[in-house]
Amino acid sequence: MKLIKWLYPGMRVKRWICLCTMGIIMIASGAARWASTGFPIKQSGFLLVVAGIGAVIISIEKIIKVFISVLLPKQEEKIVDIIYQKRQLRWGPRIVVIGGGTGLSTLLHGLKKYTDNITAIVTVTDTGGSSGRLTKQFNVLPPGDIRNCLVALAETEPLMKSLFNYRFKNGELSGHSFGNLFITALTEVTGDFEEAIRKSSEVLAIKGKVVPSTLENVSLLAKGKNGRIIEGETNIADTSFPIEKVFLKPDNCQPTFEAVQAIREAELIILGPGSLYTSVIPNLLIKKIQKAIKESKGIKVYVCNVMTQTGETDGYSAFDHLKTLIKHTYPQIVNYCVINNAAVPEGLLTKYKQEKAYPVLSDTEKIKSKGYAVVEGEIIDTSDYVRHNPEKLSALLINLLQRNLI
């Protein structure tokens, strides 16, 4: 029945199917004549074979164009480039990026140009904004950081990306993003947060995978140097006293299978960039994720933040960031530390000073003295904010991986 549908009016393929069939018949007939001993017949057979091959090539090309015009109506002229790119990216390096917040999604924007084999392992301890409200109301895991990563890896139309990031401004939905509501609704429909992420990934046609570090409802707690305990990512970020350490409740939560599997198979494991205590470290507090990183043969890199973060890393240098990471895990958690060495414009320095945020000091020699390699580069974007430039940072990381594979 499905084959008959190709013969329906308006399909625009019948004529080319007929031409292809005629071409095959001409090739067969010509081959038979070509094999004969008579010169005129042999010559006509050769011409029939050539004409038949031409008919088959033309008909196949026309049929392919019909499919492209339907499936990719706006990209007919780019089809060769698209196919080449897809083939190349499919065989790209296996990369795992661990973190959360805007830092992780920024890096993913750049990495997706090099490979389809990306797995973003995302923290699920967000308690603020839309994510926190949805978690309390529907008992789902926080979808905000997941949504950001999905959009960063998306290859769909710009309108769909804008839709997922759209934030309602009025009414009961004020403050909620459409993407957060979409993932929450899919979780309710499927009964499975992981399945909701997979379906959202299909809608956005993402490159790679986005997986939560755990599917358990966990809370992030911080112990201050004054002995005070604070619970909740938002409360920790707003704290006014130095943090001694952070930990999870419960502390024996299990990671997702896909997260552990991706780490084991990774050629490059990237920690950060992102909030040190509330985005990067929470994933590493899951013991089996930490164990998988330790056992992985991949290159392990920590991307240090560009600016200090008020309430979390006040006065921290690059070495302090790395030391804190090691304190919560183990000494060999990374092989390399990536540090920005580009200057921040004075205008932005003044702006950030008002928020009590300052450039992270690059104490490179101190890091090297402890046995860690340092990779420095001008990897920031200073157009409106001081953030990592996704293209520059990704190029640096890919070059680092390639040097280690040679």
Image (cartoon, rainbow, N blue to C red):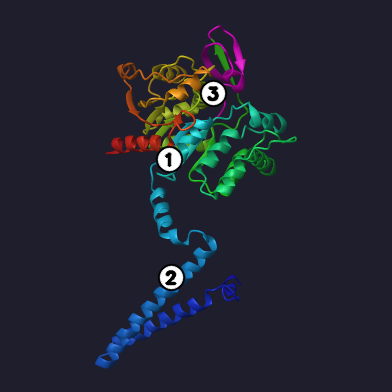
Residue lying at 31% horizontally and 87% vertically, measured from the top left: 45
Query: Mark 1 and 2 residues: CB-CB less than 8 Å, in contact?
Result: no
State the residue position of label 3.
278
- Tag 3: residue type? Thr
Q: Position of residue 366 (x, y in %)?
A: 33, 16
| Residue 239 is inside the magenta segment | yes
Label whose residue precedes the other's in the sequence (2 or 3): 2
Label whose residue precedes the other's in the sequence (1 or 2): 2
Q: Position of residue 106 (x, y in %)?
A: 48, 35
Q: CA distance from mark 1 to mark 2?
A: 34 Å
State the residue position of label 2.
61
Q: CA distance from mark 2 to mark 3?
A: 54 Å
State the residue position of label 1.
111
Label whose residue precedes the other's in the sequence (3 or 1): 1
Magenta residue span: 225-254
Q: Position of residue 32 (x, y in %)?
A: 33, 86
Looking at the image, is 369 positioned above or below residue 28? above
Count the marks: 3
